[in-house]
């Protein structure tokens, strides 16, 4: 009986060693072109995209579960040029630029940026707009109104904000003026727009 247990233990140990060796071989057998991307604390519904220098989307994926995200990509299959990974989260977009040159991928970690998106919400007839920017990026905010049944919209508010880490604005929308309000916020080369109909 002891001999049988000893044989089973030795067999299990050998299988464990072989499996760990197989994992090492499989990871070594991955093409050199494979780049593993990891993001911590993602949520279901976040969007991961790869964009080219013209901001055209060449890859898009919706995150399917909360937690940490890890995936391998063969980025050398892309034509030579400048690209970026972008993870579009609830209130921020993380952008990691990289370059593909002659089947070589180079990441510019020093140029990684975080774009803080404005949050816009309506409560009763009050429109709340806020934005956090730890690196104090400028923000342009415009509010437009279009009366119900009309085609032309008029700008009713405009503001350029600089040197401000936390932006908070509250707009009281007239209950009597039925129509469509559009808030447009521009920061770091991105435009965020939301329409509200009363």
Image (cartoon, helix red, strand yellow):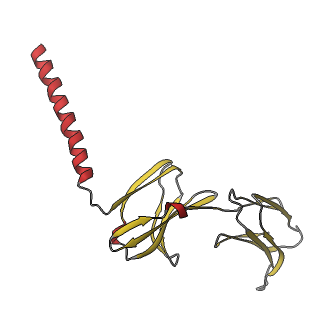
Q: Nearer the viewer, residue 135 or 45?
A: 135
What is the number of callouts on the image? 0
Asked if residue 1 can be seen in this view, the reply is no
Asked if residue 106 can be seen in this view, the reply is yes
> Which quadrant is the C terminus positioned in?
bottom right
Going by the picture, which residue comes out furthest to the front? 110
Q: Residue at x 11, y 19 (%)?
A: 4
Q: Residue at x 53, y 61 (%)?
A: 110
Estimate the x, y position of residue 170 in percent, counting from the top left: 84, 61
Q: Residue at x 46, y 74 (%)?
A: 82
Q: Nearer the viewer, residue 89 or 122?
A: 89
Residue 35 lies in what quarter of the image? bottom left
Q: Nearer the viewer, residue 38 or 163?
A: 163
> Which quadrant is the N terminus positioned in?
top left
Taking the image as shown, residue 50 lies to the left or right of residue 104, namely: right
Estimate the x, y position of residue 124 in percent, counting from the top left: 82, 59
Taking the image as shown, residue 179 lies to the left or right of residue 115, namely: right
Estimate the x, y position of residue 179 in percent, counting from the top left: 80, 75
């Amino acid at each position: 009986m002891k001999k049988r247990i000893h044989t089973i233990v030795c067999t299990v140990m050998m299988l464990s060693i072989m499996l760990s060796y197989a994992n090492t071989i499989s990871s070594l057998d991955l093409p050199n072109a494979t780049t593993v991307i990891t993001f911590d604390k993602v949520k279901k519904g976040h969007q991961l995209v790869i964009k080219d220098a013209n901001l055209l989307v060449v890859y898009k994926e919706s995150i399917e579960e909360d937690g940490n995200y890890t995936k391998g990509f063969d980025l050398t299959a892309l034509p030579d040029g400048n690209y970026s990974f972008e993870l579009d989260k609830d209130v921020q977009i993380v952008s990691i630029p990289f370059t593909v040159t002659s089947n070589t991928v180079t990441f510019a970690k020093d140029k990684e940026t975080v774009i803080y998106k404005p949050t816009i919400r309506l409560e009763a007839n009050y429109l709340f707009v806020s934005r956090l920017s730890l690196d104090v990026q400028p923000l342009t905010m415009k509010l437009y109104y279009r009366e119900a049944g009309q085609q032309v919209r008029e700008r009713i508010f405009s503001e350029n904000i600089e040197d401000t880490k936390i932006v908070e604005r509250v707009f009281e929308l007239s209950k009597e003026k039925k129509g469509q309000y559009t808030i447009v916020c521009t920061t770091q080369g991105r435009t965020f727009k939301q329409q509200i109909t009363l």
